[in-house]
Image: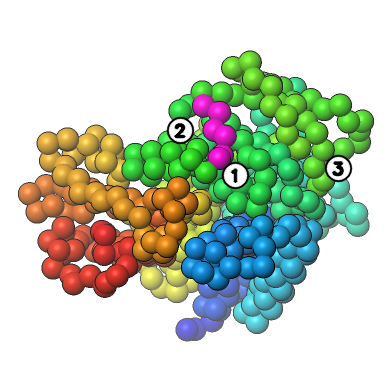
Amino acid sequence: MSPLPKHQYDYDLLVIGGGSGGLGCARRAAQYGAKVGIIERTPVLGGTCVNVGCVPKKVMWHAADVREKMRAAVHYCQTPESTKLPEVDWLKLKEKRDGYITRLNGIYERNVKNDKVDYLSGHASFIDRNTLEISQGVQSTHFHAQAQSDLSVTPKEGTRRLTAEKIVIAVGGRPVLPEIEGAELGIDSDGFFALEALPKRVAVVGAGYIAVELAGIFHAMGAETHLIVRQNQPLRTFDSIIRDTLTDHMEHIGVQIHKHSQVIKLSTSEKGPYNLAKPFPKTIETSRGEKIEVDCVLFAIGRKPLSDLVGCDKAGVRLDSKGNVIVDEYQKTNVDNIFAIGDVQGKALLTPVALAAGRRLSNRLYGGVKDDKISYENIATVVFSHPPCATVGLTEEEAHEKYGKELIKVYQSKFKAMYYSMMPEEEKEPTGMKLVCWGPDEKIVGIHMIGLGTDEIIQGFAVAVKMGALKKDFDDTIAIHPTSGEGQ
């Protein structure tokens, strides 16, 4: 590709935020020959996903899964000397997990360097539509550091200004805490990864996938686990086969779900200052009059965009009422040289979505692919619960609303995976699968599953849904036996 034309700016492209979306955008643009800088306010690249999100979470899910398999070994006649499970060395596990994340951080830095992207460490905020001011960044991604904007704007050696023809906002989001008495005694999902010991008693507050995943990890590791939800079930936006099956199973294995309940106060008899990395006794008071004694309270009640930290108003960039940057289908804001990708724009808050949006934006801006954009329809997603859940497309309820109940046909099956054939009934995890079909041709508009292996199974089915597969296409495909996937 021929060199890009010279102009009066320091950079062709500046990307604010070194997470998955920002990195994907910056590296792809540089590969096309653009002069690119990426600005990250925390000490490491990778964003939420790599540092305090999907990646370390999946490591902990694997740790919990290994523990469950140790429990299953006795039923496969591989009896250990003692059937009692060993204690979890949480601190050692944390050290190994953090070491893995540190290696990933190094890989990201090398990739950026190899692609000749300038890596700028610091906090960026708009001066105008083409100018950013860079000051000292934060020192940690844990313990609400991302939620406190004052931590990020304390210049140590002054500030500097950089200009760019185009700017991408990719700063992501942060977890929020409730506005209740004693909220500072709890941690958020960032704080989970700073814990230095497994709490004996823990309460997770929230009904979304983060709450469900972390509650599942705590319980599988041996903690007395409470899940506090405002309505009657977690995962309320998921299909009923997932909601109902998971709720029933979590209660069956001993997770205490407090339904129609909200935390109104936290208190402790301990004297401050408090080290939230270590469990200590706390009392939860709920709207139902309950008092729950725990050693750790984790709030997973939602996230908000970090748009407030970059001074969007100085560049004239519009935000919605929740602080999300408003963009069109091409990730463009109302300011024609400023774009936004990833969680900061409030749609499909998933790492692969941010990465794809960033790369396609650069394809369009610098690679000559004029109409390249992502589709937000039929994006597969997984909840790493116990057992895992997977979904793509419309729920049964959404399909009824969109197409009318009379045009929707549903096929579903429930069974126990062969893995559990050697186990007593009370230790078997459920599997459930549902196809949501529309119209006389029975086009598949939704697939929903829960059970062992569904987190991997969904990927192939997502391709089929994206391609417009019909129920007949599934029927005409000879299944692999014996697998759980043939149940679909």
State left or right for residue 181 relative to residue 380. Answer: right
Q: Is 257 part of what is drawn in magenta?
A: yes
Crowding near the residue tagged with mark 2, few <14, some 14–19, many ≥20 C-alpha atoms within 10 Å: some
Which quadrant would residue 244 be assigned to in this image? top left
Q: Crowding at label 1, few (<14), some or many (≥20) Cα neighbours within 10 Å?
A: many
The spot of residue 122 in percent (x, y) is: 77, 58
Nearest to N terminus: mark 2 or mark 3: 2
Q: Alpha carbon of mark 2 to alpha carbon of mark 1: how far?
A: 14 Å
The one of 213 and 189 positioned closer to us in this rendering: 213
* Camera-side mark, 1 or 3: 1
What residue is at 49 percent from the left and 68 percent from the top?
76
**Residue that appears at 69% across and 39% down:** 202
Secondary-structure class at tag 2: loop
| Highlighted range, magenta | 254-259
Residue 149, which numbered label?
Answer: none
Between marks 2 and 3, how big is the CA–CA gap?
Answer: 32 Å
Q: Quadrant of residue 291?
A: top right
Q: Which mark is residue 275?
A: 3
Query: Residue 221: where, in percent of width, then height?
Result: 65, 52
Q: Is residue 279 above or below residue 263?
A: below
User: On screen, 113 above or below 332?
Assistant: below
Name the element at disc 1: helix
Q: Residue at x 63, y 15 (%)?
A: 289
Give the residue pinned by disc 1.
215
Residue kind at label 1, given as amino acid type: Ala
Relative to 182, residue 124 above or below: below
Question: What's the amino acid at mark 3?
Answer: Asn
